[in-house]
């Protein structure tokens, strides 16, 4: 709404003063009724309105109320932004909120300052009835909008929880959902979070999906443990295979010495065709690229050592025994001469 339009609304809504400075109305009929009403129920005139009335300005009460509203709003809005915005920014700095995430929060703060300034300015200007009407209309509108935009509001609230709880940050590698979605967080807004998959696809995810389910964030801490499984033959030396797993982990420069790499028998240690072993190693400053590179290099090195030590990595196979008796096999009609 433009300032002129706002001033017009205020002039029409404020208590009407008299056309002349002495408070009399020269017209008869309804004018006499207006004069009587003005005498019995004098309008509330503030200092500005009283000054304008004293110097003979028409509509002194309305103009004074409008000026009071504008001045009060301007002062409160400027002071509110000058005081609250730096405090909010300092609080965001303390919590380590990213720059992209700050914009919607600062925007909400500015809107809140403007709303409070308007409400207080209405009271100072004597527009209490208008403020009450606006509050009633606002409550009804909020109820209607709430029913119509349930999903949007749910995502909005979820976005606020993401900002405050910080389960992930921009640049983190996250996994979520029953379908196993995974990717790097590109942007976080109040309604959606944008994630770039490892196939270079952009996923726009409603925030409610991220707050209502389980989110896996491998980059939440400075270190990450990798569990890598291997299988060896039943005839191979388990102790020697375990030594190779530990030696290759200690030899790799990107695998941490503390916590030290360890070896375990896998949950299905005695499978149909192999004996299962699991190596647990730790890496620092994990990222998706480091995870894949270190894991691949470690598996290649272990496979090479197994080959050098004649340790077999078996594959599933089925042995058939018995035979098929073809002596009494019946030949289908028409195939006897074949």
Image (cartoon, grey):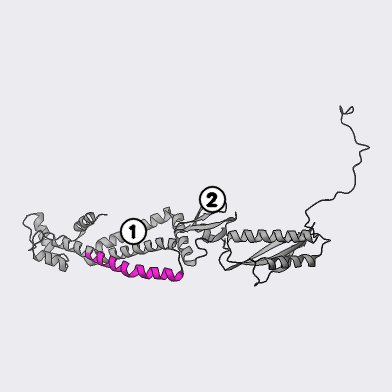
In the rendered image, residue 151, in percent from the top left (x then y), is placed at 46, 55
Would you say the magenta stretch is mainly helix, strand or loop? helix
Q: Nearer the viewer, residue 164 or 23?
A: 164
Image point 9% across, 56% down: which residue? Answer: 31
Vertical comparison of 195 with 44: above or below: above
Q: Nearer the viewer, residue 122 or 37?
A: 122
In the rendered image, residue 5, in percent from the top left (x then y), is placed at 23, 54
Residue occupying the far right of the picture: 327
Q: Secondary structure at mark 1?
A: helix
**Image quadrant occupied by the C terminus:** top right
Residue 138 disc label? 1
Answer few, some or many: residues within 10 Å of disc 2's Cα (few below 14, many 20 plus, some between 14 and 19).
Answer: few
Question: Is 80 contained in the magenta span?
Answer: yes
In the rendered image, residue 267, in percent from the top left (x then y), is placed at 73, 63
Task: Specify the segment rendered in magenta.
Answer: 71-95
Image point 67% across, 60% down: which residue? Answer: 297
Question: Is 180 contained in the magenta span?
Answer: no
Residue occupying the far bottom of the picture: 258
Residue 87 disc label? none
Q: Secondary structure at mark 2?
A: loop
Answer few, some or many: residues within 10 Å of disc 1's Cα (few below 14, many 20 plus, some between 14 and 19).
Answer: few
Residue underneath mark 2: 201
């Amino acid at each position: 709404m433009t300032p002129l339009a706002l001033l017009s609304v205020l002039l029409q809504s404020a208590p009407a003063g008299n056309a002349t400075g002495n408070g009399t109305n020269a017209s008869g009929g309804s004018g006499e009724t207006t004069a009587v009403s003005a005498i019995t129920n004098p309008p509330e005139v503030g200092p500005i309105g009283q000054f304008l009335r004293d110097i003979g300005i028409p509509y002194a009460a309305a103009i004074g109320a409008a000026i009071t509203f504008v001045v009060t709003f301007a002062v409160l809005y400027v002071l509110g932004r000058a005081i609250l915005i730096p405090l909010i920014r300092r609080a965001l700095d303390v919590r380590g909120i990213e720059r992209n995430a700050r914009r919607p929060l600062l925007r909400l703060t500015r809107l809140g300052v403007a709303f409070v300034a308007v409400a207080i300015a209405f009271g100072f200007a004597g527009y209490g009835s208008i403020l009450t009407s606006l509050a009633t209309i606002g409550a009804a509108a909020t109820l209607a909008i709430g029913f119509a935009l349930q999903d949007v509001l749910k995502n909005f609230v979820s976005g606020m929880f993401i900002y405050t709880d910080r389960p992930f940050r921009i640049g983190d590698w996250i996994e979520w959902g029953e379908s196993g979605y995974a990717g790097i967080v590109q942007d976080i807004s109040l309604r959606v979070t944008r994630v770039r998959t490892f196939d270079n696809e952009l996923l726009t995810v409603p925030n409610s999906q991220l707050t209502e389910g389980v989110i896996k964030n491998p980059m939440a801490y400075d270190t990450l443990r990798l569990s890598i499984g291997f299988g060896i033959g039943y005839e191979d030396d388990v102790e020697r295979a375990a030594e190779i797993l530990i030696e290759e982990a200690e030899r790799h420069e990107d695998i941490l010495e503390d916590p030290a790499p360890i070896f375990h028998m896998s949950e299905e240690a005695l499978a149909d065709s192999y004996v299962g072993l699991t190596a647990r190693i730790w890496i620092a400053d994990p990222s998706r690229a480091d995870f894949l590179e270190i894991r691949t290099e470690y598996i290649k090195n272990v496979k090479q050592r197994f080959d050098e030590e004649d340790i077999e990595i078996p594959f599933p196979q089925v042995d058939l025994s018995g035979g098929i008796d073809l002596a009494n096999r019946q030949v289908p009609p028409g195939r006897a001469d074949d």
